[in-house]
Image (cartoon, helix red, strand yellow):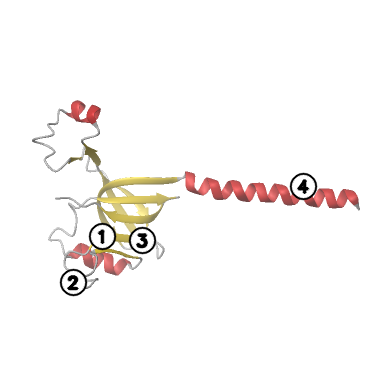
Amino acid sequence: MKKIFITLFIGLLVMMLISCNQVEGDSDNKNLYIGYIRIEKDKLFLDEVEWITSEDKDRIKELGLSQQNDMPNGYYIYNSSLETVSFKINEKTTYSFIDWGNDFVGKNEDRNYSTTKREEFIKYLDTYSDKGAKVPFWIETQDGYVLKVTEQFVN
C-alpha cells in the first residue's frame, strides 16, 4: 500500500512539473516583428522592416543615416527586402489601432481602439488609400499564430 501511494505521489509530482514547464515554455516561443501587412482570409502577410531609433547608434552609423536628415521624427524605417512571411490569424487575434476617423469610438473618446473582430480591422485598413500598406504594425506571434497586431504611430 505504501509503495502504491509513493508511486502515485511521484507520478503526480512528475505531471505537475511537466505541466509547469509547458506553461513556461509557451511564453518562450513568442516572437515580435514590425512591418507592413496585408490580410487575406485567415492569413496575415508581413513585409518585415527594421524600426531604427536614435538609440540605435551603431545601426545608424552602419547605414550611414543622419539623425537630422533621415530621422527628423526620431525614427527610420529600413526595408531591406520586399519578401513576406505569413502567419495564421484567428478569432483570438487582437487588433489595436488608432481610430483616426472615429469609426469605432466616439468623438471625445480615446482613439486607441482594440478589437478581436477581423472585419473591423479590415474596415480600418480600407480607410487608407493603399489599404494600410505603408503603415507599420507590430506583430506578436506564437507557434505560427498572430496573437496581437498593433499599429505603430508615425508622423
Q: Residues within 10 Å of mark 4 (few under 14, many from 20)?
A: few
Q: The residue under label 1 is which amino acid type?
A: Phe
Q: How many marks?
A: 4
The residue tagged with tag 1: helix, strand or loop? Answer: strand
The residue tagged with tag 2: helix, strand or loop? Answer: loop
Q: Residues within 10 Å of mark 3 (few under 14, many from 20)?
A: some
The residue tagged with tag 3: helix, strand or loop? Answer: strand
Question: Mark 4 and mark 1: span between their CA atoms?
Answer: 49 Å
Residue bearing mark 4: 10
Q: The residue under label 2 is which amino acid type?
A: Lys
Question: Mark 3 and mark 1: span between their CA atoms?
Answer: 10 Å
Q: Residue 22: where, in percent of width, then height?
A: 57, 48
Whether residue 150 is situated above or below residue 113 in the rendered picture: above
Q: Which mark is residue 107?
A: 2
Question: Mark 4 and mark 2: span between their CA atoms?
Answer: 60 Å
Q: The residue under label 3 is which amino acid type?
A: Thr
Q: Residues within 10 Å of mark 1 (few under 14, many from 20)?
A: some
Callout 4–callout 1 Cβ contact below 8 Å: no
Q: Earlier in the sequence, mark 4 or mark 1?
A: 4
Q: Is residue 11 left or right of residue 37?
A: right
Question: Mark 2 and mark 3: span between their CA atoms?
Answer: 23 Å
Residue at the location (55% across, 50% down)?
23
Q: Residue 143: where, in percent of width, then height?
A: 45, 50
Callout 2–callout 3 Cβ contact below 8 Å: no
Question: Mark 3 and mark 4: span between their CA atoms?
Answer: 40 Å
